[in-house]
Image: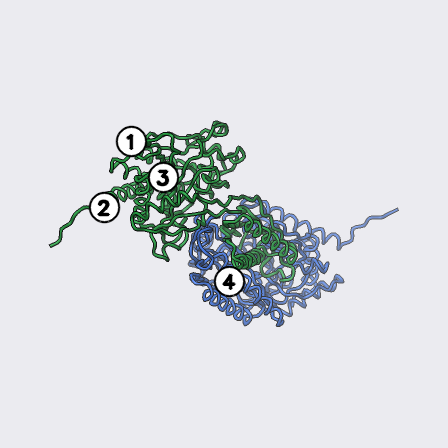
Chain colours: A blue, B green
Amino acid sequence: MTTLCTAPETGLNAVILRMIERILNRVNALSQGGPGWTRPSYSPLETAAHLIIEEEAHALGMEVRRDHGGNLIARMPGRDPQLPPIWCGSHLDTVAEGGAYDGQAGVAAALALVAAMRSQGITPEADFVVVVTRAEESVWFPVSYIGSRAATGQLLAADLQALRVDTGRSLADHMRDEGGDPEALMTAVPPAPARFLEFHIEQGPVLETAEEPFAIVTAIRGGLRYRAARLHGVWAHSGGAPREGRADAVVAFADLVMAMDRVWEEILARGADLTVTFGRVSAASPAHAMAKVAGVLDFCIDLRSDDEAVLDAADEALKAAIAEIEAARPGIRFDLGLQSRSRPAQLSQSMAEWVAGGAARLGLSPRRMLSGGGHDAAAFATAGWESVMVFIRNRNGSHCPDEGMNPADLALAVEAVYTALSGNAGP
Amino acid sequence: MTTLCTAPETGLNAVILRMIERILNRVNALSQGGPGWTRPSYSPLETAAHLIIEEEAHALGMEVRRDHGGNLIARMPGRDPQLPPIWCGSHLDTVAEGGAYDGQAGVAAALALVAAMRSQGITPEADFVVVVTRAEESVWFPVSYIGSRAATGQLLAADLQALRVDTGRSLADHMRDEGGDPEALMTAVPPAPARFLEFHIEQGPVLETAEEPFAIVTAIRGGLRYRAARLHGVWAHSGGAPREGRADAVVAFADLVMAMDRVWEEILARGADLTVTFGRVSAASPAHAMAKVAGVLDFCIDLRSDDEAVLDAADEALKAAIAEIEAARPGIRFDLGLQSRSRPAQLSQSMAEWVAGGAARLGLSPRRMLSGGGHDAAAFATAGWESVMVFIRNRNGSHCPDEGMNPADLALAVEAVYTALSGNAGP
């Protein structure tokens, strides 16, 4: 004879899991179409996703407001208004043909924490604030962490002039369309730095390989990018142009890719942290054809490291490789275009210990690790907020339709933070 | 005191030059828009260009008809109907954003020869036939020399099913739209092999560098192409995916480009003839982004040689390079797709001597050279026609808006052929 009983822990986990799945389902019903999910930054679809969270936050009895950047801020008052609040959240925009969890999971987790506290009748010591940021995916505007930098007073007037790649309209215009007020934002006084917590899927395969459900992130890599680099060669006939006279943009590009691959290997070999990625590559305009030696090729390059000096060294190596290729290949000329950067961010040691304390009470000891991707937490950390991230195990990487997070892993991480949150005022 | 006098030679050259410029101006008024000129194969624009030639041929008193492939055939009867006619012409379609002379110059030259004979009251010994072929530029349909193969009974039923890259509709449908009859074409008896002459701009810089106005072509390189090759990698996050686990389609492609560049160098070093070109390259679909390691890349590769065995050797080297890259880079897989080929074509020694004879009477000794690009003359030669080409000096290569032929160079070449034509019945 078997007796089934529902332990209080199971009840709590069920509340958390139910909210997570509910938020993911509702938000992911919104997309420009497949494959995967596409919700551009400052698009009506992103706004519609924010409205879902507003509705859910109201249902949980929270006060909801928006800042001038259009970020959604929902507050659950704590017992002690003198304590610095804990903001928890992430973003709901996606890359083109992105996945079901990048950003969404962090928002779902924040609401699940509120639902968990409500279900157990707990009032947190400090205010608990669910924040849904705008425009975290910088594929749409060539600016990093737009929403979280707007929320923390770091967005610059020049950033507002950035153009969205698909529409060609400015950030200011799109912000205004979606209910923001860019002019007011520029003069607004940001909230005093407090505490920020972000749940997010791991972009790499580390936790999946190690079979661990979640981890605590101690630092976020910074990035150095040339988003709109162009390589000029000389158009020529594929059968009529002799080898010695060619300035083939495709061959010169391949030369650069292989040179930067060797630079990457060398920098890793001396123990430094770096990633090198050529993202979009196009020699496929109407002017390009089978029967033409390419006279132009567009590309981008993305360098990331936890150390700014390494980014500078890689950037120098890139320019040296280009100079060498231009010297060796007459007729070839690179134009890297504008550089954009995001700084490496160290996260909060004390908040990491606070999360670890909650996990420990569940018998878990999550690893500490580095984030390869940039996240809103980096912008909060840069603004002086005590910030921490919790990475959730995920298959198939991120920014693709196949992102594979198990909501049970996220629920377990939320339960660990709930345990920390309900046990004390935080770090 | 200076006396100006108009020698008969000058008058002839003026008639030729006037007709060349008239045809070029009229045809080049037709384009889908710039930069350069775009008249797709079997498009209404190509048909409109054919109608201009029909009008001009009628004005020169020629009989005009069209074959089932939609090629225009205009006849100037000769004195001896027993002699094999001399067909002279080229095509009026262009690549996307092509130039003002590739194809057009050859048609203009053919009409200029008729105008020259009319102006001097000359009836050629053999019939002189101006032919305007269809669809020579195989960027639109993945089939070589469509019009000239149709004219000589070499087009296959399977070729008719090829799809135009921009419309996705079949060659048969487009042919029908532009007045052709693909069903009748399949059962038609082609004309008996006769003689074919094509004027064309040189695609390479040889004559420009040597400061020579024209040359006689002795052979045409054949080609081996993979037009729609695809490289599969694994999508990943640019900052989160460690170097060792990546299957980056862009890096694997660069590896292949550099490998084939080495193969090319080696094959040339042993004295064989070869060109290697990667034309269109695209890792720029909506799924590609700055922040993604590319999971897929589309490319094409074009190999050309005057020797089929060299094409086979280069193809083998390509497959070996791919196998090596796939073995060295787990997760990378190449799919070359369909191979298309055109055979190297030897041109007529006796027709070359006949053109050289005309040139010699003008005090000129044009060089003999190889054609790197494929031309209608290759299809006629393959069908057993005695064929020859005359290359005209040209700046900036072909298949680009900057094609730079001086009409005076073409007029001089036409005058050389006129001299051969008016002096005897041909080779």
Residue A55: percent from left, percent from top: 57, 48
The quadrant of the picture occupied by the C terminus of chain B is: top left
What residue did someone put label 1 on? B61
Mark number displayed over residue B18: none
What secondary structure is found at the residue carrying circle 4?
strand
- Outermost residue on the right side: it is A1
Residue A60: percent from left, percent from top: 62, 51
Per the model, the C-alpha gap separating discs 1 and 4 is 66 Å
The quadrant of the picture occupied by the N terminus of chain B is: bottom left
What residue did someone put label 2 on? B10
Q: Nearer the viewer, mark 1 or mark 4?
A: 1
Which chain contains the residue that carries disc 3? B
Per the model, the C-alpha gap separating discs 2 and 1 is 24 Å
Mark number displayed over residue B426: 3
What residue did someone put label 4 on? A225
Residue B347 lies in quadrant: top left
Q: Are marks 3 and 4 on the same chain?
A: no
